[in-house]
């Protein structure tokens, strides 16, 4: 079995070699490694007397999430234009933990998201805000997770399609909002919502795959736009977008794989976002989520099923469980950082990917068996059957107005 | 997160300002059963109440412009406020020079925010003036040499206004300061790819530059990735370049076992196999041996990946044997 828990000595042996050349990058890396090693050392002591470790603190995480779904402290004021995102991050996290809110709360959530829906299509970050592709993606995912007819029917799909057309650029890319910046997030979010809600047309995504591929860099990952440095979040958007468009053959998958495997940190076990940057719990999903997609592509190309994912699933779970859990609930970027809902969502999503891999084999769960999480669909980051249910609902209920563009 | 600017002693709430008494603030319309309700300061409630009102009235006035400034200060990530501010600027035909200075001050406070950099970009487009941008991004990169937004803005400006002339120098300073700064290496590639071009001479110059940096720090993935990147533009490929292959073989002979060196030699073997040009140095057997060494000793976190590549090389070695047997059959 290639998956196993690493011993402390094994981890400590793998620390960064500065080769006597200290630069900002290496000093920061050494600093973080020391923080992480302290956590692993403490864990070794604790686990000697408690065989159930490492333990995912499911209940405290769920408690924080459920309370956040109601209200949030003033420190979240800076996310006042991302409330739709907060809804998605919370619901998705709770789904992964298999601890969903009651039906009444979910129905209230549908009502709230309707307040965020813009009369001209799409969703803003809060009521009365302009539509934005990021928050539209978040709203559609959240409504798919809720998965009731009420949730599905609350989406105005004709105006949603119009909104996608208004932010589509001639080169195939998408602006995040009218008059807003264009980058690979826009393309991915547009493709994802169009696919789920069945408003996808070839014309709407003409040249989009080619534009996405132009963001693949010499390192193998994808940047936010052509020329920019390969980056975990953008690489996920790139490969997931291409996969949803069925156009992965346009990109260099071997180069993407080489780049992505090298983002896993040999000491910490978690992923960094870019070469020579620091580990961050959120890349557990952005980078980790790339691997099941790559396995699927390689299986297609080689005509033989690759059932596994090609990163170290055990080490990633160790990092999330031992270094990224806040005692009072919620997950964090790295030791020493405060918890937040974004890192909670992507830490849990990454943990789920690390346990389930491609989904073709039995899950590999580090620590207590109770740590096992629900699976996610790697292309949308919503449970696979919830994606399926939404797509099929929207196939059965075509939008009232056909695309005339 | 928001600072406590509520405590500004000179702050007068909008509801107490006589010049605003014709406007009724609009509270957030969360519906009857709101979720994710964020606690707001009184100041936030006050400013955004008036902002919603102005937005609804579509008022594009000087006072509305000022209001957006207060709203942005409370939440610089509110893209609606920024967009509306641009609409007002356009309608009022405002002097954009002062807007330039203003957005610069916001960038200094929130350098990792999509909206502020986009606002800057739109202003540069409107004025067709990029004269301050290299300095602005240089300042931001002094604070954080890997700030993605600053690099993205810088690349856009350089590309749009053709400001390449000093860029190699700038990149060189950053790489000298921190040879592991991958953003700087990426920028080097950007300049070569969009400006200097991949002439044989340039490729050779870049190879020499990069090998010097690898000699200095052998475990620096940024330099190894860049080396592979530039060799994509060398007609002879990865293993056809004598300077590169003798450099790698010397390192290997001198017991360097940096995973990036071993991975690079594997890529050379892979290329030789694909081009059907295997030789005593670059062949499937050596690739297999190196994959094994990486999987079991030098890069254990990536054991699965190296074993996967190893299987691929085993298969193509198998195919080679079958092919040569087939050839023998034909000759006989």
Image: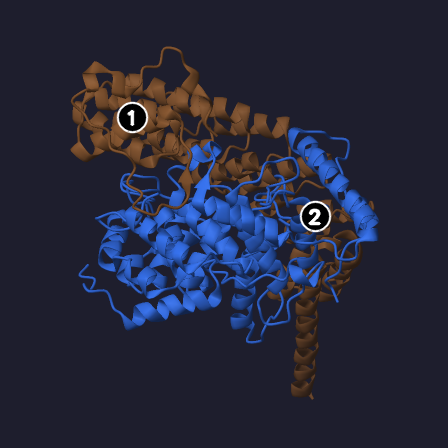
Chain colours: A blue, B brown
How far across and how far down the image is residue A244, in percent?
A: 41, 62
- Quick check: A188 above or below A72? below
Question: Which residue is identified by label 2?
Answer: A322
**In the image, what residue occupies the spot 73% across and 46% down?**
A267
Q: Residues within 10 Å of mark 1 (few under 14, many from 20)?
A: many
Is residue A373 found left or right of A211 in the rendered image?
right
Is residue B129 found left or right of B168 in the rendered image?
left
Chain letter of mark 2 equals A
Disc ID at residue B303 = none
Secondary structure of the residue carrying numbered label 1: helix
Question: Which residue is identified by label 1?
Answer: B68
Chain letter of mark 1 equals B
Residue at the extreme bottom of the image, as rendered: B332
Is residue B250 found left or right of B27 in the rendered image?
right
Question: Is any part of residue B210 visible from this angle?
Answer: yes
**In the image, what residue occupies the spot 65% across and 86% down?**
B330
Secondary structure of the residue carrying numbered label 2: helix
Is residue B139 found left or right of A266 in the rendered image?
left
Could you say which quadrant of the image residue B14 lies in? top left
- Front residue of this view, candidates B81 and A264: B81
- Quick check: B279 above or below B102? below
How far across and how far down the image is residue B281, in percent?
A: 74, 58
- Front residue of this view, candidates B63 and B186: B63
Question: Is any part of residue A219 visible from this angle?
Answer: no
């Amino acid at each position: 079995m290639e998956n196993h828990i690493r011993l402390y000595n094994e981890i400590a042996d793998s620390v960064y070699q500065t080769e006597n050349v200290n630069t900002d990058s290496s000093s920061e890396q050494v600093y973080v490694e020391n923080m992480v090693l302290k956590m692993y050392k403490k864990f070794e002591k604790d686990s000697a007397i408690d065989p159930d470790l490492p333990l995912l603190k499911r209940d405290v995480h769920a408690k924080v999430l459920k309370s956040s779904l109601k209200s949030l402290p003033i420190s979240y004021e800076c996310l006042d234009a991302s409330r739709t995102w907060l809804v998605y991050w919370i619901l998705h996290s709770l789904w992964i933990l298999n601890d969903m809110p009651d039906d009444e709360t979910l129905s209230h959530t549908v009502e709230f998201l309707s307040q965020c829906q813009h009369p001209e299509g799409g969703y803003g970050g809060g009521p009365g805000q302009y539509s934005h592709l990021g928050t539209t993606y978040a709203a559609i995912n959240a409504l798919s997770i809720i998965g009731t007819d009420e949730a599905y029917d609350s989406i105005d799909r004709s105006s949603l399609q119009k909104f996608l057309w208004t932010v589509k650029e001639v080169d195939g890319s998408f602006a995040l909002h009218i008059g807003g910046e264009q980058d690979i997030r826009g393309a991915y979010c547009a493709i994802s919502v169009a696919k789920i809600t069945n408003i996808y047309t070839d014309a709407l995504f003409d040249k989009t795959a080619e534009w996405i591929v132009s963001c693949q860099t010499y390192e193998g990952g994808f940047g936010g736009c052509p020329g920019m440095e390969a980056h975990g979040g953008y690489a996920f958007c790139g490969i997931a977008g291409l996969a949803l468009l069925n156009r992965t053959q346009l990109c260099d998958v071997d180069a993407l794989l080489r780049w992505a495997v090298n983002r896993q940190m040999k000491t910490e076990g978690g992923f960094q976002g870019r070469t020579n940057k620091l580990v961050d719990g959120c890349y557990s999903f952005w980078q980790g989520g790339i691997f099941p997609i790559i396995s699927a592509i390689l299986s297609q190309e080689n005509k033989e099923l690759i059932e596994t994912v090609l990163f170290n699933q055990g080490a990633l779970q160790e990092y999330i469980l031992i270094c990224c859990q806040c005692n009072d609930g919620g997950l964090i970027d790295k030791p020493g950082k405060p918890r937040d809902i974004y890192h909670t969502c992507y830490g849990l999503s990454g943990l789920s990917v690390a346990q389930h891999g491609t989904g073709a084999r039995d899950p590999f769960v580090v620590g207590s068996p109770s740590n096992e999480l629900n699976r996610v669909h790697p292309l949308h980051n919503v449970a696979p059957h919830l994606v399926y249910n939404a797509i099929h609902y929207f196939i059965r209920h075509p939008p009232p107005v056909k695309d005339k563009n | 997160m928001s600072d406590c600017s509520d405590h500004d002693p000179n702050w007068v709430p909008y509801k107490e300002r006589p010049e605003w008494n014709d406007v009724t603030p609009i509270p957030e319309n969360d519906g009857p059963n709101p979720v994710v309700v964020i606690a707001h300061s009184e100041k936030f409630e006050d400013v955004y109440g008036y902002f919603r009102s102005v937005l609804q009235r579509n008022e594009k006035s000087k006072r509305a412009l000022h209001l957006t400034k207060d709203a942005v200060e409370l939440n610089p990530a509110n893209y609606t406020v920024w967009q509306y501010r641009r609409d007002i600027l356009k309608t009022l035909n405002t002097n954009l020079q002062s807007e330039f200075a203003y957005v610069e001050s916001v960038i200094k406070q929130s350098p990792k925010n999509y909206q502020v950099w986009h606002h800057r970009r739109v202003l540069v487009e409107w004025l067709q003036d990029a004269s301050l941008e290299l300095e602005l991004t240089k300042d931001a990169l002094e604070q954080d040499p890997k700030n993605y937004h600053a690099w993205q803005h810088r690349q856009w400006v350089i590309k749009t206004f053709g400001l390449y002339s000093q860029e190699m120098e700038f990149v060189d300073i950053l790489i000298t300061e921190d040879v592991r700064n991958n953003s700087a290496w990426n920028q080097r590639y950007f300049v070569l790819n969009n400006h200097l071009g991949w002439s044989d001479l340039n490729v050779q110059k870049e190879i020499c530059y990069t090998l010097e940096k690898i000699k200095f720090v052998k475990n620096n993935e940024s330099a190894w990735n860049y080396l592979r990147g530039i060799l994509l533009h060398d007609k002879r490929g990865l293993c056809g370049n004598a300077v590169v292959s003798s450099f790698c073989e010397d390192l290997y002979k001198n017991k360097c076992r940096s995973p990036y060196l071993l991975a690079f030699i594997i890529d050379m073997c892979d290329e030789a196999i694909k081009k059907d040009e295997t030789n005593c140095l670059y062949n499937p057997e050596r690739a297999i041996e190196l994959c094994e060494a990486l999987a079991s000793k030098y890069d254990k976190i990536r054991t699965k990946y190296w074993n996967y590549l190893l299987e691929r090389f085993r298969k193509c070695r198998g195919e080679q044997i079958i092919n040569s047997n087939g050839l023998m059959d034909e000759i006989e």
